């Protein structure tokens, strides 16, 4: 059928039809809403209104450990794992990390790095929560304080994959534009031309360039990798970021969580 030949009134009616918009909602939406404490959304005037609400405002579920939303282009499910549910090395030691609220975070708490040598963050998500036949991408959602340091030319390994299976791995180099840290420069021998102490040239990624998508104007998204959910497997999707070979001090990283959402073509 050629949609261009359909009467405009027919198309307009279809666009407002509950039956049409219901196909974009996950079949377990009632259970998800009951977990969120937002069951009142079920009283939305239409399925279109409910769909748009789920696209525009993530819901906290599982006692605030996760957030849930829908991708507005595909209707596929999106989740963010809160910082509290991530594995952060030394994260429970107040000497190295502190837990605090942040006005731009969707969660009650974020993790703020005071100072640490070994930086490693990993998360996991049950694949049964994801939409089938969907290519997902995972992002570490962070921001930096004004006085952050230790991230200049910092090599990091990121990986995504099923627990017990193969993981996609890649190395990226973080760099906060304009970072000044005399101790770091003096002790590690870094310069604008050289990215490691042995003098090898490295590819740096400036922390605010186009490689980093923005979850909001206040947050940066660092891509960890991608995973195809075919819907036939049960398991844990594991995601990891670790700073490689870098035991010098780092400070000023704020972690909101790890988001898993469909890749847009």
Image (cartoon, rainbow, N blue to C red):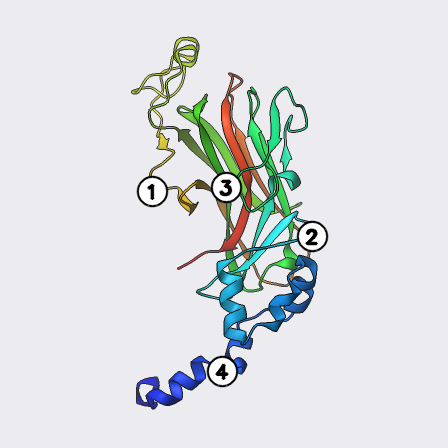
The residue that label 2 is drawn on is 62
At which x and y percent is residue 240?
57, 38
Disc 1 crowd rating (10 Å Cα; few below 14, some 14-19, many 20+) is few
Is residue 220 shown above or below 265?
above
The Cα–Cα distance between marks 1 and 4, rounded to whole angstroms, is 39 Å
Is residue 146 shown above or below 63?
above
Disc 3 crowd rating (10 Å Cα; few below 14, some 14-19, many 20+) is many
Q: Are marks 4 and 2 in contact (CB under 8 Å)?
A: no
Q: Are marks 4 and 3 in contact (CB under 8 Å)?
A: no
The residue that label 4 is drawn on is 17
In front of the other: 253 or 157 = 253
In front of the other: 85 or 41 = 41
The residue that label 1 is drawn on is 210
Instruction: Report the mark closest to the observer, 4 or 3.
Output: 4
Q: Are marks 3 and 2 in contact (CB under 8 Å)?
A: no
Instruction: Report the mark closest to the observer, 1 or 4.
Output: 4
How many numbered marks does the figure carry?
4
* Earlier residue among tags 1 and 4: 4
Q: Are marks 1 and 2 in contact (CB under 8 Å)?
A: no
At which x and y percent is residue 87?
64, 35
The Cα–Cα distance between marks 3 and 2, rounded to whole angstroms, is 20 Å
The residue that label 3 is drawn on is 141
The Cα–Cα distance between marks 4 and 2, rounded to whole angstroms, is 31 Å
Disc 4 crowd rating (10 Å Cα; few below 14, some 14-19, many 20+) is some
Q: In the picture, which quadrant includes the C terminus?
A: bottom left
Disc 2 crowd rating (10 Å Cα; few below 14, some 14-19, many 20+) is few
Instruction: Report the mark closest to the observer, 1 or 3.
Output: 3
Q: Are marks 1 and 4 in contact (CB under 8 Å)?
A: no
């Amino acid at each position: 059928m050629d949609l261009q030949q359909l009467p405009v009134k027919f198309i307009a009616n279809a666009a407002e039809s509950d039956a049409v918009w219901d196909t974009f909602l996950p079949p377990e939406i009632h259970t998800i809403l009951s977990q969120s404490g937002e069951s009142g959304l079920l009283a939305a005037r239409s399925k279109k209104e409910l769909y748009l609400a789920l696209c525009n405002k993530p819901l906290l579920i599982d006692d605030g450990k996760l957030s849930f939303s829908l991708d507005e282009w595909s209707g596929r499910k999106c989740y963010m794992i809160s910082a509290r549910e991530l594995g952060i090395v030394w994260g429970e030691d107040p000497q190295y990390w502190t837990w605090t609220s942040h006005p731009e975070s969707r969660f009650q708490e974020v993790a703020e790095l005071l100072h640490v040598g070994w930086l490693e963050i990993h998360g996991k998500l049950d694949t049964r929560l994801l939409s089938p036949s969907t290519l997902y991408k995972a992002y570490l959602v962070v921001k930096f304080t004004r006085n952050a340091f230790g991230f200049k030319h910092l090599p990091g390994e990121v990986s995504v994959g099923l627990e017990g299976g193969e993981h996609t791995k890649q190395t990226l180099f973080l760099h906060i534009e304009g970072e000044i840290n005399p101790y770091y420069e003096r002790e590690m021998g870094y310069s604008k031309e050289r990215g490691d102490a042995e003098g090898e040239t490295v590819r740096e990624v400036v922390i605010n360039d186009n490689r980093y998508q923005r979850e909001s104007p206040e947050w940066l998204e660092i891509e960890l990798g991608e995973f195809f959910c075919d819907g036939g497997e049960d398991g844990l999707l594991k995601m990891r970021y670790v700073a490689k070979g870098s035991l010098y001090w780092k400070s000023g990283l704020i972690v909101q969580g790890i988001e898993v959402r469909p890749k847009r073509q």
